[in-house]
Amino acid sequence: MRRLSRREFTRRAAAAGLATALSQTRVFGASDRIRLGFIGLGNRGDQVLDGFLAHRDAEVVAICDLHQPYLDFAAKKIGANPKQFKDYRQVLDLKDLDAVVICTPDHWHALQMIHACQAGKDVYVEKPLALCVSEGRRMVAAARRYNRVTQVGLMRRSAPLCKEAVDLVRAGRIGKITTVRSFHIQNEWPNGIGKPPDEDPPAGFDWDAWLGPAPKVPYNRNRTFYRFRWFYDYSGGQVTNFGAHYLDLTHWMLGHDAPQAVTAMGGKIALDDNREIPDTLEVLWTYPGGTLVIFSQFNANGAPADLHGDIMEVRGTKGTLYLTWNGYEVTPEETATMDFPALTPLDRSLGRRWETSRKVWIEPHKAEGADSTALHERNFLDCVRSREKCHCDIETGHRSTATTLIANIAHKTRSYLEWDAASERFTNNDEANKLLSYTYRAPYELPEV
């Protein structure tokens, strides 16, 4: 597991990788395949693998995971006897590798992505990009220094359906945007993820390696695999997991990449389990021009946000766009035919009311689409060849992820926080700024770039 110390690996990669990364000029022929290494194959990793396997010009030559059943399942699916590893650094050592795909838990993304850049590999990394804001900024710096093509797995950037909706909003078809609201709704009451006891890790499972830079704690099965998202040592919870998708789409629609302020309220109100993240949460951001952006997390009640079961609603002065996972609908707004009147008691007794008429600036519209993961991967593969910027380049993915990360800081500090996007610091709360980074567990170190 530790052929090289982590510090020695970082030093060698930085020294050798800068030269090789900047000089890598492989010219791909029409029939050449882009050789990929996969790091992390559980849950989302398996889904992302399916997407890449659909592309004939992609060849998965190496796979890496701490969990042997995941390796076995992926190898059988790939069917070409890929090299198997449990230490991601061995994947990065491969000379015949063009790019890596990182689908590990959030707290591993920064180390693996930066080391991949130093090793001269292009990188597709899943969202949420990082566990804290400073990690994300360091990842951006690494991609730029080592001249790497990067794609963050916010795949709606590659969805024709979403681009159509974005173009509609940015063209002013529904007027000035006053509010964007998104939802994560899932009833987990009463027991949520449960309260399993701490115990010894399963035979063959390297718990210390799974923790990596995270604090050393006893093994608990709720802290592994998908349920790690309910613990702050490894994830930002659902506001970063689902919220990163919604805020990225919001940024695209508004033409902004960062809010001006954020606050959040909520907590663990109803569920009896050992989670750390809230089961009920409301986050509010403000954006230039006054637009209010809201994320609502309801995990102890499953009633839909509205009759459509939408995940996002974009309210403009001329109409409203309702977005679901696989479609959207636009409805026009009713507007007043006169200035808003001050109705008297007599007016109300006579049934008089504020008169409105439907002004159809945009016809009611519906559209449908499919999952865009494979399209997002297609864009990455094309950019590996062309060296062009991907649809969700590392800077874009960082800005969208950072917006959700500062929501958690607002909630933890019970604060209204003013955000300076240029310096990526809060201007009104020094204590909150301390949560923009964290100290890795020794001997792990976030590389200087």
Image (cartoon, helix red, strand yellow):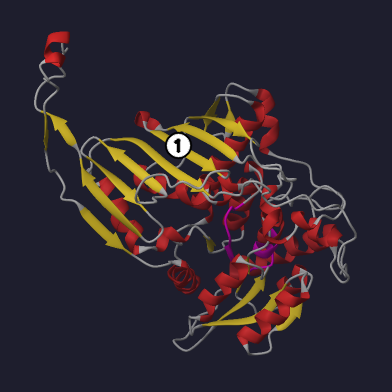
Eyeballing the image, is 101 above or below 279? Answer: below
x, y percent for residue 250 = 41, 45
Q: Residue at x 90, y 60 (%)?
A: 200
Whether residue 433 is visible, yes or no, is yes
Q: Which residues are magenta?
A: 114-129
Which secondary structure lies at badge 1?
strand
Q: What quarter of the picture does the N terminus occupy? A: bottom right
Q: Amino acid at mark 1?
A: Ile
Q: In the image, is residue 206 above or below residue 182?
A: below
Residue holding disc 1? 294
Front residue of this view, candidates 370 and 191: 191
State which quadrant residue 47 falls in.
bottom right
- Residue 120 in magenta stretch: yes
Q: Residue at x 49, y 81 (%)?
A: 54
Q: Position of residue 19 (x, y in %)?
A: 66, 66
Residue 24 shows up from this direction: no
Location of residue 145 in the rendering, given as x and y in whole percent from the top left corner? 61, 56
Q: Is residue 343 left or right of residue 161?
A: left
- Residue 80 at x, y percent in the picture: 64, 90
**Left of 180 or right of it: where is 428?**
right
Front-most of 390 and 218? 218
The verdict on residue 403 being magenta is no
